[in-house]
Amino acid sequence: MRYLALILICTCFQFNFGQDHFNNPLQSKDPIQQQKWVDSLYTSMTIEEKIGQLFMVQVFSDKGKAHEAEIAKLIKNQHIGGLIYSKGGPMRQAKLNNELQAASKIPLLVGMDAEWGLSMRLDSTYAFPWNMTLGAITDNGLVEQAGRQIGEHCKRLGVHFNFAPAVDINTNPENPIIGNRSFGEDRDNVTEKGLAFMRGMQSAGTLANAKHFPGHGDTEEDSHLKLPTINFSAKRIDSIELYPYRKLIKQGLASVMVAHLNVPSLETRRDFPSSLSKHIVTDILKDSLGFKGLIFTDALTMKGAADYVEKGVDGTRTKSLIQGGEIDLMAFLAGNDVMLMSQDPEKGIAKFVEAYNNGTITEERLAHSVKKILMAKYKVGLQNYSPVGMYNLVEDLNRIKDDALYEELMENAITVVKNSNQLLPLRDLETKKIAYVALGDDNGSPFLDELKKYAKIHEIKADKLDGIISKLQNYNTVVVGYHKSNANPWKGFKFSQKEMAWLYEIARTNTIVLDVFARPYALNDLLTVENIESIVMSYQNSKIAQEKSAQLIFGAISAKGKLPVSAGQFFPVGTGEDYNSLMRLSYGLPERVGMDSQRLSRIDSLANRAVSEKMTPGIQLIVARRGKVIYNKNFGYQTYEKKNKIGFDDIYDVASLTKILATLPVLMELEEQGSISLDDKLGDLIPEYKNTNKRNVTLKKMLSHYAQLKPWIPFYYATLDTVTNKPDPKYYRKSRTEGFTVEITNTLFMRDDYQDSIQKVIRDSDLLSRLRYRYSDLPYYILKVYLEDFYAKPLSEIAEDRFYKSLGANYTTYNPREKFSLKNIVPTEIDNYYRYKKVHGYVHDMGAAMQGGIGGHAGVFSNANDVAKIMQMYLQKGFYGGKRYLKSETVDKFNYCYYCGDNNRRGIGFDKPQLGDEGPTCGCLSMTSFGHSGFTGTYAWADPEEDIVYVFLANRTYPEAGKNLLLRENIRTDIQALIYEAIID
């Protein structure tokens, strides 16, 4: 019978225990051990030690030894229970924290305001987006991840409580202190975001704190400076402001911070701070909402509490309560557990001891709060305290994964709030002439630089509006970037009267995209948006926000965000137009696409080696995966004189990459249209070949380098003087004259009719004695003439009109001197055999030079970014930027090895991986991959199986071609191997 009774008692205990565990967010995973530790420690403490636990004092890690000694004294003499760190740096804080923890008999509970990360208070730490930005995201899982990573940072630094998230519902645009710190104005959205953030942070082992109870979102005053008033009914407050707390409490919220607010509907005493109100703290928060976690006051040094004075019945002042510790005591008696940043902790503790001794504070009341604090200490692991590790601390607080998350957060937050006629994303780039105008008072260069990756963009500046309007007449699309400081969430955001006037006039006379890099309330003052075709809300002016917004404008990423607040009279909360990506290249971190940044960075050493050992003066290098450029770096200089560093907008002679960047796509287009067939014979395609030894050569064999054609014919040899070995005056003039207009250099012009001689030499040339794979340029001499006859225009114009312009390949061209400054054109050689001068801005290949710089096999100049676009178009089976250039089956047909069985690895125009041990690749990628290399040191490769594009541009021929050290040392293919070794997913 006694055994049965024991079972019943245990069952009831377990039931009650389980109920407490469900309701008490401070209970740990081992509640029995936790309770033993709490009870044992509480029993051993003096009354002063118990009361000291109720105080959390402010600490700075940048105020020096005197301040630190003062805090240590408070810990030793007043038995302070917790610290809230403010300004400083992570290394200093960690060192100081370890020292202060060592000085404390009972481990200290550490808190911080880290709403958007530790950078809210500390230098050298990470800043995630503001809550307002997070409020625009529809995927709450991303907000949860943000909370988790902020929690990881806090835990790494020894911070147990993060006073976040702020769940104030910001229904007042003029709110001076909340604003960007709020998730928005919509009750449900704020609740969902706050809940996600809390879950994430607490899953990382850092306890959350919802603030500012009962709701600071609809005030026009800052409680740091005075006591704000909330003039809503109790019913409204219960249904709106308290709603997030109710939901978060049910899901295990660890703590709440009570604000200093005057709320007449909840507290009848006039101008009585909510933090001191028993009705608000105990009756509502603890009893009505059932909250059992820790309750913190907001900082008691804030004027909203510190300026409170008792009043007589006639309303006159009687005395200030802040100096004698009365405010602290009132806050405790109201139901708060932790007195945050008391004005005078020593006097406050003395006041508590006095109140305990006279019965004002009962043992039950004291034990209630102190034991909750001790439970929290156990829950965060302080029963087994260990110091903060100093090794690698700053790196641990600034991780690649944090940048990766920031990128993803911004991609999901940026909001298209207006998009008349579906102007965005910008399409049909061949028809666009785009200008950029900067407004605001902060830097917008990352935005402009990113825009330039997609199209030709000119920044327009002028001191007066008339000058701007005049210059903009040459453009049909204007991007206006409004850039405001991203230093903190309280920075100014409003348009000036001058800026609004300029904006209205620019919009009246142009098609514009307005991109706002500030809080959404910036749009409140706009009287009209009638003439503004598209408006993008980017929320912040961080570098990543600017880059992602440019990518969104061009459709490299999709539009997903929704306004978290109403933005003026035109855009209610929830506004946001979605659109899908146009499958243009975007730019981001390797980890976003299953690559490892650290492993990928090993490329740097190989590229630097190539430059330092004079294999090439400089390099442009791009790696993209899954449509995202993840490595985009330049190395070295244009020449060994080291005067001009390689820049992203420098262009290289890409040599034989011309074959797949110009001639091949045009041929592919004609083939899929039925104008030609791969089985067509030269004799049928080109009448001049009908009676030659090449009449039966098919396009398939010719473009597979399997047609017995000579590898190379040095056409220029025949035009040199046999005695001087210099250009023969019979064929050349030093200036442009009648009949000599083919520009080899600016001081060398060839006879016009010699281009026909080149074609005759090819027609009359012998075939090789046997059929085997032999790489040859001759097919591209032949096909260049065919294509130009077909379209009745130069190949340069054909490729530009049909591909480059619409692709946004604005740095890709023949004869670059006509379009670009020489300072942006990388020289290729100091020629001592034909041109006898520096080859700079003219094609290096002699045969292409003799064709006026426009060869089917060579002549194209480009940068790595443009080459990557064209390779990505191939990788996406002929689709890019919302436009289909080629059919999928066409790309497959040309990217096929028809003669692999004959030991010929080549596709149709494309090079393919080696069939044996040696060849053009690292030997570590799929046989479906394809690409090409060029004599000047260039290389471009795409792999459909791993979805990778790799572009390497160099001028290894400068100052002389000589030995190909890049090839001999396998630099390009060794880099390719490193790319594949960096794949983690």
Image (cartoon, rainbow, N blue to C red):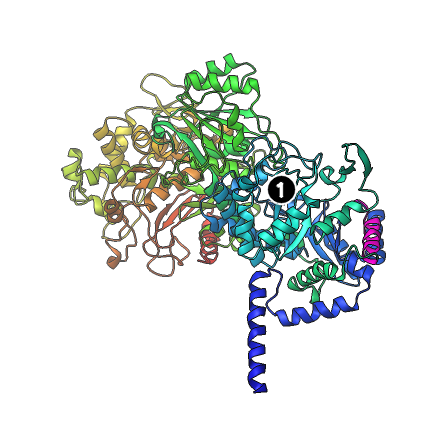
Residue type, numbered disc 1: Leu
Residue 561 falls left or right of residue 391: left
Q: Is residue 936 visible?
A: no
Q: Position of residue 5 (x, y in %)?
A: 57, 82
Count all numbered tags in the image, as a single digit. Answer: 1
Q: Residue furthest front?
A: 313
Residue shown at the point (17%, 39%) measured from the top left: 674
Residue in front for this viewpoint, 812 or 683: 812
Q: Position of residue 598 (x, y in %)?
A: 54, 54
Q: Position of residue 409 (x, y in %)?
A: 50, 45
Residue in front for this viewpoint, 174 or 297: 297
Magenta residues (range): 342-357
The quarter in which the C terminus is drawn is bottom left
Residue in front for this viewpoint, 484 or 625: 484
Q: Residues within 10 Å of mark 1 (few under 14, many from 20)?
A: many
The quarter in which the N terminus is drawn is bottom right
Residue shown at the point (54%, 33%) measured from the top left: 519
Label 1: which secondary element: loop
Q: Is residue 30 magenta?
A: no
Q: Considering the whole magenta stretch, tell me its main secondary structure.
A: helix
Residue 565 falls left or right of residue 355: left
Q: Determine whether 568 is above or below 42 in the image.
A: above
Residue shown at the point (42%, 56%) measured from the top left: 922
Residue in front for this viewpoint, 424 or 300: 300
Q: Is residue 697 visible?
A: yes
Q: Is residue 353 magenta?
A: yes
Q: Position of residue 940 (x, y in %)?
A: 40, 45
Circle 1 residue: 266
Q: Determine whether 644 is above or below 533 in the image.
A: below
